[in-house]
Image (cartoon, rainbow, N blue to C red):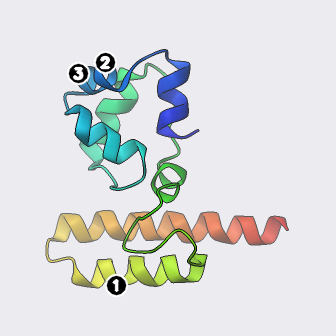
Amino acid sequence: MTLKDARIRAKLTQTELSELADITQTQLSFIENGKVMPHATTRINIEKALKGYRIDWITTRLQGKIALGYAENESAEDRVIGAINAFIKSALTKERRGRFNFLHEFLNKYENQLTAK
């Protein structure tokens, strides 16, 4: 489930969840709306604050109108190209690893969607 779905099921506001996860409400809003992919530590803190709800971080990230530099109406292939470009431009090793993991999960999910059709 997406972060927003989990937050609503947990009956928490963005402000409440952000306080529990030790991030700002603005950061939570960006994450929830798919504008950014949170660091692994932040994802763990959010899931702990949600007490048992597992978040599908890929779906949460991809639901944004603009994520990884692509427009809402662009194809999945364009999204992958955007992810690859962002990966190549990543200067930091940890950031590059995070982008690679995101790209890998996205490709696996996309492949599963194709084979399900």
Q: Tell me the kind of residue under disc 1.
A: Asn
Image location (x, y in percent) of residue 96:
25, 71
Quadrant where the N terminus sits is top right
Q: Nearer the viewer, residue 55 or 27?
A: 27
Can residue 53 be seen by looking at this rendering?
A: no
Q: Which mark is residue 19?
A: 3
As drawn, the label of residue 44 is: none
Label 2 vs 1, first from the N-terminus: 2
Q: Which residue is more in the foreground, 92 or 29?
A: 29
Q: Which quadrant is the C terminus positioned in?
A: bottom right
Residue assigned mark 1: 85
Relative image position of residue 48 (x, y in whole percent): 36, 25
Vertical placement of residue 83 versus 13, above or below: below
Could you tell me which residue is drawn at 40 percent across and 76 percent down? 83
Residue 16 image label: 2
88 over 76 or under it: above or below? below
Residue type highlighted by circle 3: Glu
Q: Is residue 110 left or right of residue 86?
A: right
Please tell me whether mark 3 sits on a helix, a strand or a loop: helix
The structure residue drawn at horizontal position 24% and vertical position 39%, both measured from the top left corner, is: 26
Q: How far apart in space, not on screen, are marks 3 and 1 (Cα)?
A: 34 Å
Q: Which of marks 1 and 3 precedes in the sequence?
A: 3
- The quarter holding residue 21 reads top left
| Image position, residue 75 (x, y; %) | 60, 78
Q: The residue tagged with tag 2: helix, strand or loop? A: helix
Does residue 2 appear in the picture of this structure? yes
